[in-house]
Amino acid sequence: MDYISTTCVIAGGGPAGLMAGYLLARAGVDVTVLEKHKDFLRDFRGDTIHPSTLEIMHELGLLERFLNLPHSEIRHLTVEIGRQKFTVGDFARLSTRCKFLGLMPQWDFLDFLAHEARKFPHFRLLMQTEARDLLMSGKRMAGVLAKGPSGAVLVRAGLTIAADGRHSILRDKSRLPKKEIGAPFDVLWLKLPTQRGDPVDIVGRVMGGQFFVMLWRDAYWQCALGIPKGSFDEIRREGITGFRARLRSIAGFARDRVETVTGFDQVKLLTVAVDRLEQWARPGFLCIGDAAHAMSPVGGVGVNLAIQDAVAAANILGPVMRRGAPKLADLKKVQRRREWPTRVVQWAQVAAQNRIIAPTLRAARTPEPPLVLKLLQRYPALQRIPAQLVGVGVRPEHVRFETDMVHLGQPRLEIVPPPVVIPIHQHRR
Ligand SMILES: Cc1cc2nc3c(=O)[nH]c(=O)nc-3n(C[C@H](O)[C@H](O)[C@H](O)COP(=O)(O)OP(=O)(O)OC[C@H]3O[C@@H](n4cnc5c(N)ncnc54)[C@H](O)[C@@H]3O)c2cc1C
């Protein structure tokens, strides 16, 4: 077994975990991030970089370098219902520095953050290291037991952050109470080739009882087909020819490319979950991002929310951790700050799921465009509202700017983790 002692261990190298790791290391905290995969190269990640995330990159002095990476800039949110096209949001109307939504493969974004974080001497990223259990010391969480490439790793820590996504192991182990909200649909994730002249954009289409989203990824379109929850087996029974016919009816300008889908091994089922913890923290332990609140893909806002959680956590805990281990009251402040924006966004997602997506999938016909879409066309100034909700969200976070937060020397304070730790399931309740 390998032993590591750190001030803060973060399980999960997704947007929430890496941003929290970067910011805490920047504030002088000794941080260890564990990521279970050997790289960030998985294609089922949201690719949207929101104007408010770009604002944070600017506040960190990273924006210019970041925008040198290949990306595309989406200025409008559009949706097609049947044969009608509607502009829903206009990012040019935002007051943010970047008046667009960036589209970049998420692995490039995460590689960039990891590269920048490694410049802080007390930031450690352990790839291929999966957190499997929580450790306790007395009544406090005291780190994680993980499985690394060469065996077990015991990480003792003054603070443990779960940022391990919507199927979070650590959240389950902590037994924090959770409210299941649910989603009536799942997503089939597949690729179609791009061709010269394609719109470099996000395409959302609702037609004939189906909805389809296409994200431009230069060499190919990353496509998401919404299906009623639990219906993938039935679709598979239709065979690949039947599936291609389905795709053809919704793929619009890319309909002639569906022949490139030759088998169901090219189609990945992504189950959609929506839930929220009632309590995000226990002594020595905090959940952020999807681990605290699994987001629906509706509106493509989960990545932004995860980043905002990370910024709030670092703003609140960074200064506290210069003095010592955070108390439960400090951790609860993170929930107090972020729970309201989470509730608002989940409320909007659930409304869209129940009022638009579920009836569309059930009725197997193209729905009538809702009145609100017609109003947005007639009064374009209103397009600022959806742009603000999607691009910035409610209660956007800002990096606290004290220059002495940027710390390149030894960690400011080593919180000595407790010497005796036991796995949580062995802990006497
Ligand atoms: C089909 C689908 C499409 C979506 N599309 C978008 C979109 O376009 N835009 C958008 O903003 N949001 C989108 N979302 C939502 C978005 O993906 C999430 O809200 C967001 O990724 C949450 O970020 P996170 O860092 O909390 O978790 P994640 O992104 O899930 O990251 C968690 C990380 O932890 C790692 N991990 C997991 N378990 C462990 C462990 N035990 N030990 C160590 N590491 C572990 C994982 O490998 C992963 O890297 C989509 C969601 C779905 C389901």
Image (spheres, rainbow, N blue to C red):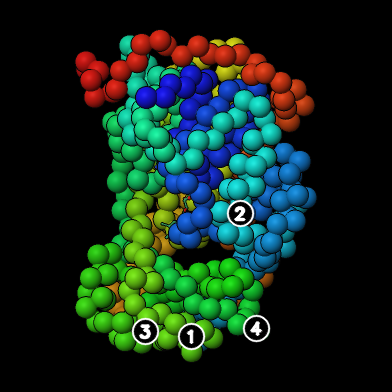
In-image side of 6 versus 347 (left or right)? right
Looking at the image, is mark 4 or mark 2 earlier in the sequence? 2
The kind of residue on which mark 2 rests is Asp
Looking at the image, is mark 4 or mark 3 earlier in the sequence? 4
**Disc 3 target residue:** 244
Looking at the image, is mark 2 or mark 1 earlier in the sequence? 2
**Disc 1 target residue:** 257
**What whole-number distance in Å separates the C-alpha atoms at marks 4 and 1?**
13 Å
The kind of residue on which mark 1 rests is Arg
- Residue 427: x %, y % from top left: 25, 18
Looking at the image, is mark 3 or mark 1 earlier in the sequence? 3
Q: Looking at the rendered structure, which numbered label has been put on residue 196?
A: 4
**Disc 2 target residue:** 108
In-image side of 297 versus 268 (left or right)? right
Quarter of image, res 18 = top right
Residues at circles 4 and 2 in contact by the CB criterion of under 8 Å: no
The N terminus, quarter of image:
top left
Q: How crowded is mark 3: few (under 14 residues within 10 Å), some or many (20 or more)?
A: many
* Badge count: 4
Residues at circles 3 and 1 in contact by the CB criterion of under 8 Å: no
Q: Residues within 10 Å of mark 2 (few under 14, many from 20)?
A: some
In-image side of 285 versus 50 (left or right)? left
From this view, report whether residue 111 is shown above or below residue 224: above
- Residue 370: x %, y % from top left: 47, 74
Q: Residue drawn 24% across and 82% down?
A: 238
**What whole-number distance in Å separates the C-alpha atoms at marks 2 and 1?**
27 Å
The answer to whether one can see residue 336 in this image is: no
Q: In the structure shown, which secondary structural element does the residue marked by tag 3 occupy?
A: helix
Residues at circles 4 and 1 in contact by the CB criterion of under 8 Å: no
Q: Residue drawn 57% across and 18% down?
A: 321
The kind of residue on which mark 3 rests is Arg
Please tell me whether mark 3 or mark 2 is closer to you in this view.
2
